[in-house]
Image: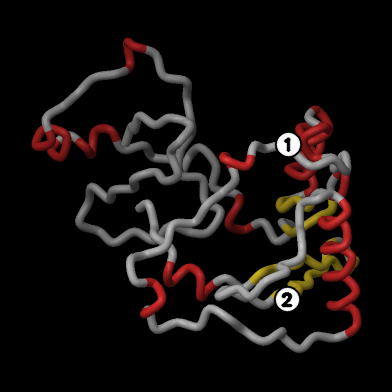
Amino acid sequence: MTQLIDSRCNLVYAYNATNIPSTILANKLLGTLDEANGSQIQTLPRSQWMRSIASFATDTSSIMDTTSNRADRREMEGPFGTTMFGDSNEVQQLGILVSEFQDVFTDSGDPVIIPKEDWLSIPLVPNWEKVDTKLTHRVYPMGPKDRELIDKVHDKLHEQSRMEWCREPSLFGFPVFVVWKNVEGKRKGRVVVDIRGLNKVALTDA
């Protein structure tokens, strides 16, 4: 099925034009992206689109069906501390791409200058104070390694003026924890903020 999308697209519509159930395997290639031009664009009434949708379907089984059985696909460390997922050939190709845009993946130590009026704001639902959810939490218990990593990350953010202390009472307080994983035999941690309570009172745009 052919679809017209732009850079803001965050999903692609998948449609099974048969009456036979189909299972989509993880990492299976579903199609390809092509640059559209005016000669490729046409509009169809919905009824005609639904009748002819099968003719637009693309059989991708012959394009690439090797990813589902690749036992060697895993997380690997790439250039500049990046983490990549794939087999050795895929990671090599990704590494070339990352190296081409080194400035994007390298932390210069300087914060991005964003005017205060452009700072991210999170609108809340009406009467959010009455929503049955917890917006303040106690600090999660953690071991010395977790605390050491959190302090290291937060200290750096303070030095870069990306984080500041809250010096007055706040109705919001969300705990922080560390997710650990092994990348090429090395233990790598990522600091995560648990904002599930905030998600319950945030006004979504979808």
Asked whether, in this view, residue 65 is left or right of residue 31, the answer is right
* Lateral position of residue 109 relative to residue 14, left or right: right
State the residue at coordinates (60%, 73%): 170
Q: Which residue is more in the foreground, 181 or 173?
A: 173
Which image quadrant: the N terminus? top left
In the depicted view, which residue is nearer to us: 59 or 77?
Answer: 77
Q: Which picture quadrant has residue 5?
A: top left
Quarter of the rendering containing residue 24 = bottom left
Q: Secondary structure at mark 2?
A: strand
Mark nearer the N terminus (1 vs 2) = 1
Residue 117 rendering spot, x and y as whole percentages: 57, 40
* Place of residue 143 in the rendered image (x, y in percent of width and height, measured from the top left): 85, 86
Amino acid bearing label 1: Ile
Q: Amino acid at mark 2?
A: Phe
Distance from Cα at disc 1 to Cα at disc 2: 28 Å
Q: Which mark is residue 29?
A: none
Location of mark 2 (residue): 177
Identify the residue at horizontal 48%, vertical 39% (top origin): 62
Q: Position of residue 40 (x, y in %)?
A: 33, 16
Residue 7 x %, y %: 48, 31
Q: Which residue is label 1 attached to?
A: 113
Identify the residue at image location x=45%, y=82%. 133
Tag in front: 1 or 2: 1
